[in-house]
Image (cartoon, rainbow, N blue to C red):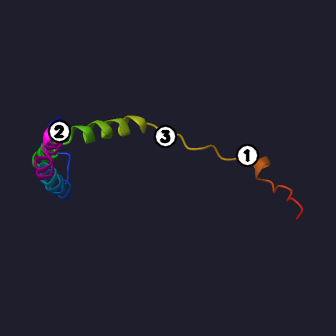
Amino acid sequence: MNGQNLGGWERAISVAIGLAGVGKGVRRGGISGWLEVAAAVLVVKRGLTGHCALKEAFSGLEQAAVVEVHPLPEPSPQRRASRPRASR
């Protein structure tokens, strides 16, 4: 599915954090800086497109895990009887 799965604020924050990461990575330089730039560009892309593959994958897992929920059984009447209290 390629539809949008991010809200407006989430998209705006992704773009802002991604642009900050690009700037920070360029200033750092070297291999680690360029790796940071690459990751930040992906965050900017996430904000601009409004689609996050990780969010989509995790929401699918959540839906699969909660397909059927069984309530706990009611306690039997014998177990509801008051228990003897410990002496103080």
User: Percent from the top left, x then y, of residue 24?
Assistant: 15, 52
**Alpha carbon of mark 3 to alpha carbon of mark 1: how far?**
21 Å
Left or right: 17 with respect to 83? left
Residue 38 lies in the magenta stretch: yes
Asked whether 1 or 81 is in front, the reply is 1
* Three-letter code, disc 2: Leu
Residue at 53% across, 40% down: 70
The magenta region covers: 23-40
User: Percent from the top left, x then y, of residue 68?
Assistant: 45, 37
User: Percent from the top left, x then y, of residue 19?
Assistant: 12, 52
User: Percent from the top left, x then y, of residue 3?
Assistant: 15, 41
Q: Which residue is mark 2?
A: 35
Residue at 70% across, 47% down: 75
Q: Quadrant of the C terminus?
A: bottom right
**Alpha carbon of mark 2 to alpha carbon of mark 1: how far?**
61 Å
* Three-letter code, disc 1: Ser
Q: What label sits on residue 46 in the rendered view?
A: none
Q: Which residue is mark 1?
A: 76
Residue 27 lies in the magenta stretch: yes
Q: Residues within 10 Å of mark 2 (few under 14, many from 20)?
A: some
Q: What label sits on residue 69 in the rendered view?
A: 3
